Amino acid sequence: MHYPLEEAGVWTDCVYLRKPVIHNDYASLQHRKGLPAGHAEVVRELVVPTLRNERVVAILGVGNKPSNYQENDVELVAYIADLVWSIVEQKRANEQIRQLNAKFERLAMVDELTDLPNRRAFFANGAKEISRVERYRTPLSLLMLDLDEFKEINDTYGHESGDLALKAFAHLLVENLRESDVAARMGGEEFSVLLPDTEIENAIILAERIRAAIEDENFWIQEDLIHLTASIGVAAFNTEAASLEAMIKQADDHMYRAKQQGRNRVVY
């Protein structure tokens, strides 16, 4: 990692020989490269390679035994080297497992199509926010959004094009939110947004801004320019909606009222 092997000096002889090497008279070695600044003087050394599948994966060197190194030293140091590498491998395996578990956990909480949190993640985040509201009495609002007449896009252009439109919509939605807001895909063309520290009045303003941004956006599908609209329901944590489920139901009811009133509108 620091310099080419051929510049490393006599302590890498074991790599070329692929077996342990003893240098009981270090000073007499003609091919030694010298020592780094501040390194202790080397009188004698024993260096062993660790092999895995015929490949040298590590070198362990010990030095300056008061007497000459013998074969029994080789056996002991080789055992230590093998043990050390086994620990390294286990640590690496544990890290790989940790990374794999983290990846699986992320996959379990993220919608594969839009890269937004999924329904499971939404409820997990929602539970945390409800606990925070109950503890600190901070405001919390919620939006439920449904793209209007989205089935026509799937029927006209196919589900693959519909998926592209959903991805573009998800990107637009996130662009209009704060970092602390949590947008999630609940399924199909239905989305939700958790708005921490947000009073109902500000949630309504944000919902209207999102609705207008969707209406004004140009979405291209198969060289056709299309316009999407969304119906949005707004709810807030209060005595009538004192749980995440109650907030979702209230926002959902308002969203369907928006559909009934002509779509492309915000109802609260």
Image (cartoon, helix red, strand yellow):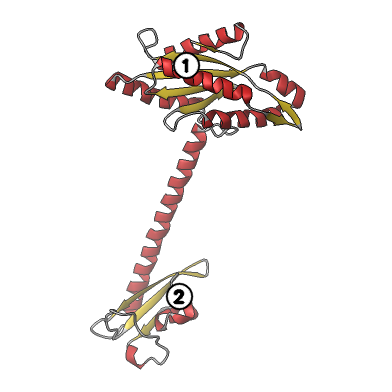
Taking 227 as reference, is 46 left or right?
A: left
**Which one is nearer the viewer's eye here, 83 or 56?**
56
Say which residue label 2 marks: 3
> Which amino acid is tagged 2?
Tyr
Q: Secondary structure at mark 2?
A: loop
User: Picture coordinates of residue 29 (x, y %)?
Assistant: 38, 91
> Which amino acid is tagged 1?
Ile
Instruction: Report the residue at 32% width, 87% height from top.
Output: 24
Say which residue label 1 marks: 204
Q: Is residue 71 above or below residue 83?
A: below
Quadrant where the N terminus sits is: bottom left
Asked if one can make out residue 66 in the rendered structure from this viewpoint, the answer is yes
Q: Quadrant of residue 238?
A: top left
User: Picture coordinates of residue 137 (x, y %)?
Assistant: 29, 19
Instruction: Report the residue at 43% width, 46% height from top.
Output: 98
Tag 1 or tag 2, which sits nearer the N-term? 2
Taking 153 as reference, is 6 left or right?
A: left
Q: Residues within 10 Å of mark 1 (few under 14, many from 20)?
A: many
- Are discs 2 and 1 less than 8 Å apart at CB? no
Q: Residue lying farthest left?
A: 66
Taking 167 as reference, is 142 left or right?
A: left
User: Picture coordinates of residue 167 (x, y %)?
Assistant: 61, 31
Instruction: Report the residue at 56% width, 20% height from top.
Output: 211
User: Picture coordinates of residue 247 (x, y %)?
Assistant: 43, 14
Q: Is residue 211 above or below residue 79?
A: above
Q: Quadrant of residue 194?
A: top left
Q: Secondary structure at mark 1?
A: helix
Instruction: Report the residue at 37% width, 59% height from top.
Output: 87
**Which one is nearer the viewer's eye here, 20 or 238?**
238
> Spatial distance from mark 2 to mark 1, Cα to Cα?
62 Å
**Which one is nearer the viewer's eye here, 44 or 224?**
224
